[in-house]
Amino acid sequence: MRIGVPKEIKNNEFRVGLVPSSVAELVHNGHQVTVETQAGMGAGVTDADYVAAGATISASAEDIFANSDMIVKVKEPLAVERKRLKKGQILFTYLHLAPDAEQTKDLIASGATCIAYETVTAATGGLPLLTPMSEVAGRLAPQVGAHSLEKAAGGRGVLLGGVPGVPAAEVVILGGGVSGTHAAMIALGMGANVTVVDRSAEVLRRISAQFNGAVRTAFSTRDAVQDLAKTADLLIGCVLVPGAEAPKLITRAMLKTMKPGSVIVDVAIDQGGCCETSKATTHSDPTYVVDGVIHYCVANMPGAVARTSTFALNNGTLPFALALANKGWKQALIDDKHLRNGLNVHDGKVTCKPVADAQGLSYTSAESILGL
């Protein structure tokens, strides 16, 4: 199979779809890999590294899209990239389609087979291709939140860990999944007072046991979220409904009750965000203020630590990329129901129910397409 790796063009996105070790595995299995020149530079990978692994370097993204059977990326294709997709081509990347009707429309029109990292599942449960980036984003969230709390950044002027005689900041984390757990670990390590909110009693028990009671827990109700929002210096939104738009747990009315200069870091922004006032921002312009509350809503947070993120992502994606290349998309999806769950759009049909439901589109199951 001919596999293409274009350079990411999203604002300040420095990750890359394949690293040299992944390229070497694909080449060893008889496939051709073409990488756009300097695609890996942001992650510290040179063209020479790719050539040594067996890849061909191309100066043109257009050529890569035109001559590849499968495109491997990190972020969702932007409008100019979507126009280059073609019928029968495989796109393997993050898509986050539920809140993005324009992208869904373009992918339907392309006729391509679009497999989303974030909806691939695992036999043990969970989302194995979303997990590494959730870990990174969770660990970054207290870090960027702490910076946003600094007075020079527009915040309250509160040190996350406090000092002797001065209380530590109150950090409230909505969601105790992968990103929420990692956010709690870092915030606690920075000395903050941490509360994790979740609607699963089992998750709350796990959090309590994992941190030996050092992290407070609260069952998620509207009243609980509203009361905790009032106390928060830093509120981190880590709520995830796989494939679907994130629920809006923080309403505009709640903002008016929050402390002036407090900070919201909305990790869920890829899926539309869990705050009514959240809108996607970029690393070059990461924050904005609504009702005196700073919002950090960067839609590709892991791109800030591109090398760590790229290698962590490849650890998860490589087995699936090999299966798609070795077997072809159809047989790979027949053989692996978990990879099959990643199919979001195929030949003009939406094959992910949460996406179809979010946008009022007709849904076609992957099983019916595969004749299962």
Image (cartoon, grey):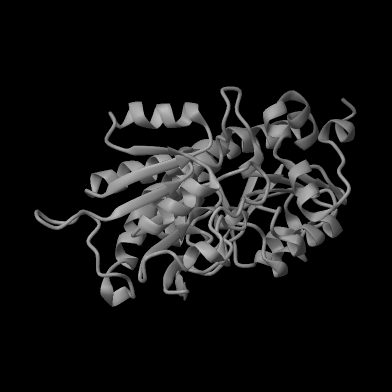
Q: Is residue 38 left or right of residue 140?
A: right
**In which quadrant will I find the N terminus?**
top right
**Relative to 61, residue 33 above or below:** above
| Residue 352 visible | no
In this rendered view, identify the residue nearer to me: 202 or 330. 202
Q: Is residue 58 left or right of residue 334?
A: left
Q: Residue at position x 76%, y 35% from top?
A: 328
**Relative to 77, residue 336 above or below:** above
* Residue at the outermost left position: 164
List x then y, in percent, for residue 268.
54, 53
List x then y, in percent, for residue 64.
68, 59
List x then y, in percent, for residue 75.
59, 56
Q: Residue at position x 73%, y 33% from top?
A: 340
| Residue 173 visible | yes
In this rendered view, identify the residue nearer to me: 133 or 173. 173
Q: Residue at position x 39%, y 54% from top?
A: 141
Q: Residue at position x 70%, y 39% from top?
A: 342
Q: Is residue 95 left or right of residue 38?
A: right
List x then y, in percent, for residue 140.
38, 53
Q: How many marks?
A: 0
**In which quadrant will I find the C terminus?**
top right
In this rendered view, identify the residue nearer to me: 362 or 340. 362
Q: Is residue 115 left or right of residue 117?
A: right
In this rendered view, identify the residue nearer to me: 221 or 101. 221
